[in-house]
Image (spheres, helix red, strand yellow):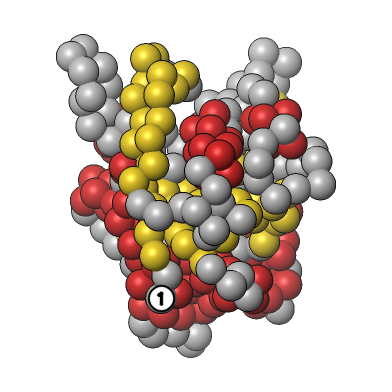
Amino acid sequence: MERQFKIFSARASIKIATQICKHLDVKLGNNTIIEFSDGEIEPSYDESIRGADIFIVQSTMPPADNLMELLLMIDAARRASAYKINVVIPYFGYARQDKKGKPRVPIGAKLIANLLSSAGVDRILTMDLHADQIQGFFDFPVDHLYSSTLFIPYIQSLNLPNLTIASPDMGGSNRANTYARFLNAEVVICYKHREKPNEIGKMLAIGDVANRDIVLVDDMIDTAGTLTKAADLMLSMGANSVRAVCTHAVFSGEAYKRIENSALIEIAVTDTIPKNHVGKKIKEISVSEIFASSIKAVLEHRSISEYFIQ
């Protein structure tokens, strides 16, 4: 007998989960989240999942309730005798804490990995981890997808005459090189010195910028301080135009204001984090089809390496 598969969503990612289901031509599973008056969460599945391959969709951005809700749904699925528990985490929160950068701090990404493992996950599908080595924090399969499979065709469609790929910081140099290799473009790397978190002391650009059409690439934008400072620097150095592509639109603090007031012509982001974007410069591209195709490939035991442009 063919085993069933079902897709469910926690509350933070219902929109993208619904889109994934449309691509797969299936209905989103029925589940309920009860929230007690003190904020305690109790999820329940409103249909049988015994013996089924289930996929739970939830990004784990703050507040911490998003992570807690996911963990409780995983636990409920395990206790309801699901055959395989697959978790789709479009945005993997706490990924910036992948190592100890100074004494007496946690490795948050490893802690989250431990929590997910203990809850009973069999597989994770995620996109653009802030640090690739986080895959090694798990002892089960992690399908790490890349938004470059969407952004590279998008950049090609712009038909920029003097395309140059840029990274807003040294940490993104490998990512920039990947894009440049596929697009046959030059690379510019920005060097930044932070005085404290979310505050940049100084920034320099390494590479040719004058008369170039710059596309900055990054995995996430938080306050947009680094990105907009890099864009303004590029324009001051003689760039023809400056655009950006970024996977995870965290957009906290004054991010929208900074983007609107910056040299950026446009910034393309994905819907891994649900947002009602403010401003005319932001273009959203959905990753739902990539996740839907990956889910289908997992179920059919096929390769998903086509989504590993790196």
- Where residue 235 sits: x, y (%)? 58, 44
Circle 1 packing at 10 Å, graded few (<14), some (14-19), many (20+), is: few
Answer above or below: position of 157 versus 132: below
Residue 242 shows in the view: yes
Q: Is residue 101 left or right of residue 9?
A: left
Given residues 268 and 177, the one toward you in this image is 177
Q: Is residue 269 above or below residue 112?
A: below
The structure residue drawn at horizontal position 60% and vertical position 51%, both measured from the top left corner, is 242
Is 262 placed left or right of 201 in the picture? right
> To which quarter of the image does residue 63 belong?
top right
Query: Can you give x and y, in whole percent of width and height, for residue 180 in the image?
Result: 40, 67
**Figure quadrant of residue 285:** bottom right
Q: Is residue 161 above or below residue 280?
A: below
| Rendered view: 2 above or below 100 | below
Looking at the rendered structure, the number of numbered marks drawn on it comes to 1
| Residue 113, position as x, y percentages in the image | 32, 41
What amino acid type is highlighted by mark number 1? Answer: Asn
Query: The residue tagged with tag 1: helix, strand or loop?
Result: loop
Horizontal relation, residue 78 to residue 137: left or right: right
Residue for badge 1: 184
Is residue 172 visible to the viewer in this orientation of the structure? no
Where residue 236 appears, x then y in whole percent?
A: 56, 39
Q: Quadrant of the C terminus?
A: bottom left
Give the residue displayed 41% in from the left and 76% down from the top: 184
Extreme-left residue of the structure: 103
Residue lying at 81% horizontally and 47% vertically, measured from the top left? 280
Compare residues 101 and 89 and report the one nearer the observer. Answer: 101
Please tell me which residue is depicted at 63% across the width and 75% down the height of the picture: 159
**Front-most of residues 37 and 303:** 303
